[in-house]
Image (cartoon, helix red, strand yellow):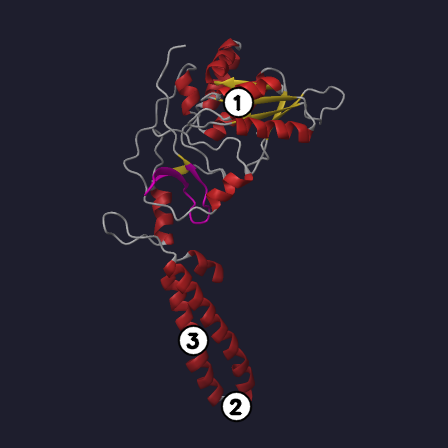
Amino acid sequence: MIALAMQSDWRLSAFLSACCLFAGTVVLPSYAAGHPLLQPIFNMLALPAWVLAFLFAAIAVIRFLGRPPASAGGADALSAGAAFRDQTQARPPVSAGGGSAGGKTTAELGRAASAPAEGPVAEPPPERPPRPTAWSLAVLDQVEWKRFEDLCCAFYREKGIAARTTVLGADGGVDIRLFQDDADASRATAVVQCKALSRPVGVATVRELRGVMAHEKVDKGFFMAPRGFSPEARAFAAENRITLVDGRLFLAMLQRLPEKASARLLALATEGDWTTPSCPQCGDKMIARESARGAFWGCRRFPGCRGRLPMRRLVQEETV
């Protein structure tokens, strides 16, 4: 009941506080007066009733002070329960891009969990783009971050390399581990980081991958990012045995595969809803929402899950 009150509108906590107060001051004393033999028991129950009344009153005050402000149209903010119903009914749009959560760090997930209450659902949700029949830079750019990780892992497997993705949540700077040690099949020989960002990857993020390589005692690292890398990141990678794979290079690698293998990867990458990002915390598909700072992706399970991602703009279709 306390957990429900913490996630619900402040009015529920105020109502529960009033009920406990009424029970402790009216109901229990009335029963105690009519049953002298049971009076010690009723007196013992009165104290928990007072404690619960104070606790629910405190929760009501906290929820009241922390409620979101009214929207620009002047309507009252939705309660948490109404907001959750809206999220489960809304269809997630896809034109704003797949979000960017590849290579999730503990700090990034922490910021997502502590983000403020979700805003209204962005409208109107556009149609899902048609399923492509060939690889292109635009296809790689539209693939959502989790599907992009799965695509990269499947690519290495098509090349005959044992590969495993990490589980959802803070991944410690590694999305995929490669295993090519014939003497010890369980020892990772290379690590792969994937980032579907809306901008080129900077040198600080590439340095993090180098730190992971040293920690896991692997000599090779691969960084895959459709939007490419900054000049500083490229210089650092060249000195530290890190292979950078941007969108153009990955596209060429996919197109050089045997026709059937390339088709299998395209089918994997574009199956179902392949553009709406997955929540980095629970894995469910997200919903486009609006806030005072612009549109963002929010988890459809809010308030049970507070995962959120920034929007990313799609690159224009290019002929390669």
Query: Is residue 112 depicted above or below 260 in this figure?
Result: below
Amino acid at circle 2: Pro
Residue 204: horizontal and vertical position, in percent? 54, 29
Q: Residue at x 53, y 14 (%)?
A: 261
Image quarter of residue 41: bottom right
Along the polypeptide, which appears first: circle 1 or circle 2?
Answer: 2
Amino acid at circle 1: Ala
Q: Which residue is mark 3?
A: 21
Q: Nearer the viewer, mark 1 or mark 3?
A: 1
Whether residue 201 is visible to the viewer of this picture, yes or no, is yes
Q: On the picture, is 184 further left or further right than 27? A: right
Residue 47: horizontal and vertical position, in percent? 52, 78
Q: Which residue is mark 2?
A: 36
SS state under label 3 = helix
Q: CA distance from mark 3 to mark 2?
A: 22 Å
Q: On the picture, is 242 further left or further right than 3? A: right
Q: Nearer the viewer, mark 1 or mark 2?
A: 1
Local crowd size for mark 2, using a 10 Å CA cut-off: few (<14), some (14–19), many (≥20): few
Q: Nearer the viewer, mark 3 or mark 2?
A: 3
Whether residue 281 is visible to the viewer of this picture, yes or no, is no
